[in-house]
Image (cartoon, rainbow, N blue to C red):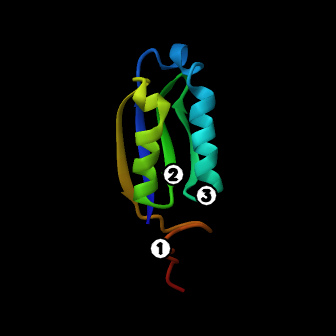
């Protein structure tokens, strides 16, 4: 099982992001190095949300709790969702078609 951390960004997210971006990115890359965070990034142009793919639920929740974007109101809502990945080299539960 993988876990999606889904963020909803504040309307002024882009205007306020710069003040917190380095700390946010340091936290993200530290989670990559530990193997907890697999992928992450903003959705939309301009961004209206963000998705971060985690290897486990506790890491996703800990990330949101420590993220300066959340603490400083750049993220108006967040949730952690289970994602049963079934296709791809990194799928948690690979399912192949019948032969």
| Along the line of sight, the residue nearer the viewer: 74 or 90 | 74
Could you tell me if the residues under marks 3 and 1 are in contact, i.e. CB atoms within 8 Å? no
| Quadrant of image for the N terminus | bottom left
How much space separates mark 3 and mark 2, taking CA atoms? 14 Å
- Looking at the image, how many numbered discs can be counted on the residues? 3
Q: Where residue 59 sits: x, y (%)? A: 46, 54
| Residue at (41% x, 29% y) in the render | 71
* Dot placed on the residue nearer the N-terminal end, 3 or 2: 3
Which label lies toward us, 3 or 2? 3
15 w.r.t. 69: above or below? above
Q: At numbered mark 2, what does the secondary structure look like: helix, strand or loop?
A: strand
Which residue is disc 3 drawn over? 34
Mark 1 neighbour class, 10 Å CA radius: few under 14, some 14 to 19, many 20 or more: few
Quadrant location, the C terminus:
bottom right
From the viewer's side, name the closer residue of 95 and 58.
58
Q: Is residue 44 left or right of residue 62?
A: right
| Residue on which disc 2 sits | 53
- Residue at point 55%, 57% (across, down): 36
On residue 93, which mark appears? 1
- In the rendering, at what x and y percent does residue 23 appear? 59, 32
Q: Is residue 93 left or right of residue 77?
A: right
Looking at the rendered structure, the secondary structure element under dot 3 is: loop
23 and 8: which one is in front?
Answer: 23
Name the foreground residue: 69 vs 40: 69
């Amino acid at each position: 099982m993988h876990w999606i951390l889904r963020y909803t960004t504040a309307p002024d997210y882009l205007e306020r992001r710069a003040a917190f971006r380095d700390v946010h990115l340091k936290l993200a890359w530290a989670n990559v190095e530990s193997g907890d965070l697999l992928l992450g990034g903003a959705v939309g142009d301009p961004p209206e949300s963000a998705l971060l793919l985690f290897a486990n639920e506790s890491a996703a929740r800990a990330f949101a709790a420590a993220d300066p974007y959340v603490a400083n109101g750049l993220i108006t809502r967040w949730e952690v969702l289970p994602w049963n990945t079934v296709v791809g080299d990194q799928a948690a539960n690979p399912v192949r078609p019948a032969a």
